[in-house]
Amino acid sequence: MFSLSLSVLPVFLLLMAGAVCQRWRFPMEGFWSGVDKLSYWVLFPALLFTKTSQIDFSNPMLPKYAFILLLALCVTAVFVFITIWLMKVVMPTASSMLQAGVRFNTFVMLAVAGSLYGDNGLVLAALGSSVLIPSINVFLVVSMTLMHGPSSTGGSSSVSLPRLLSGALVRNPLIGSIVLGSGLNLLGLTPIILVSDVVGMLSQAALPLVLLAVGASVRLEAIRSVGMTFVMSAVARFVVFPLTIGVMCWWFDIRGLPALVAVLFGLVPTATSGYALARQLGGDADRMSAYITMQTILSVVSLPVCVWLSQLYLS
């Protein structure tokens, strides 16, 4: 357990360093928002392209892997919807609970997978991301539009669901890099001379800068009295999602590294991009910010314990 905590600790030290730098406005005002944009549009897509271009799609385990992750997404969403109905939560808060439950922080996920399991873990994490990132984006855009109605998108009722959906997918650089890397891989066109080397060098800078930027985005002042809505969204994120994955891995007799990496998708905090989507589609953005901050802090304690349990039962 102690060695496991030491393996994960560098990830969270970088998160804390980013938070401290932002609080002290170091090195200058607005610097970390620029790093965040650089990471989102350049560095992280480079990392996802590099890893998806290396995936062995002939592995017969991959369909099961995708099925398990998508099933966990569905089970978690159903749990959140039932919770929303039982608690009679208003729609803006409900959609933020849904995001907090089903979204995962891809940046932290890949950093933890690489820290714990090396390059093989990173490749499997990129594979899982290639399944979940498009699926979660489609699911959330559809769900939130149905929950809030077309007027939630900025007051224009002329914005249709297909247009919203296509816009969310086309403008997402993570999805684009996954599609491009996987497509070229399947066509047997990777590695690409010079291009793969340049993109590979960019990907090496991605994780440390991304973690610093994620830490800088944490807003302690956003924490208010969120009460049971936070508790239930955290249960969805840290209990229902990983437990479903663990049970299905046991059912399909998937053990070792693939199972351990799959469970990680349910152990990392929700994505910081949930705040922007909440603002765009009518969710409770302030509450979403609090969920992101509190889940990130909670995961510092919960993640090493849960990883230890998963290694105990799924290795």
Image (cartoon, rainbow, N blue to C red):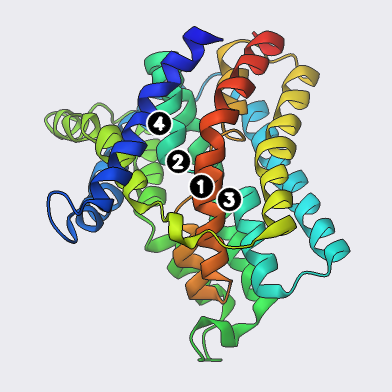
Which image quarter: residue 152? bottom right
Sooner in the amino-acid sequence: mark 1 or mark 2: 2
Q: How many marks?
A: 4
Q: Residue at x 37, y 63 (%)?
A: 171
Disc 1 to disc 3: CB gap under 8 Å = yes
In the depicted structure, whether residue 108 falls above or below residue 293: above
User: Which residue lies under the disc numbered 1?
Assistant: 133
Give SS at disc 2. helix
Q: Nearer the viewer, mark 4 or mark 2?
A: 4
Which image quarter: residue 211? top left
Label 3, label 2: how far apart the Cα atoms are: 14 Å
Give SS at disc 1. helix
Q: Nearer the viewer, mark 1 or mark 2?
A: 2
Label 1, label 2: how far apart the Cα atoms are: 8 Å
Q: In this orientation, which residue lies closer to the viewer: 206 or 85?
A: 85
Q: Nearer the viewer, mark 4 or mark 3?
A: 4
Give SS at disc 3. helix
Residue 106: assigned label: 2
Label 4, label 3: how far apart the Cα atoms are: 27 Å
* Residue farthest along the right direction in this orientation: 86
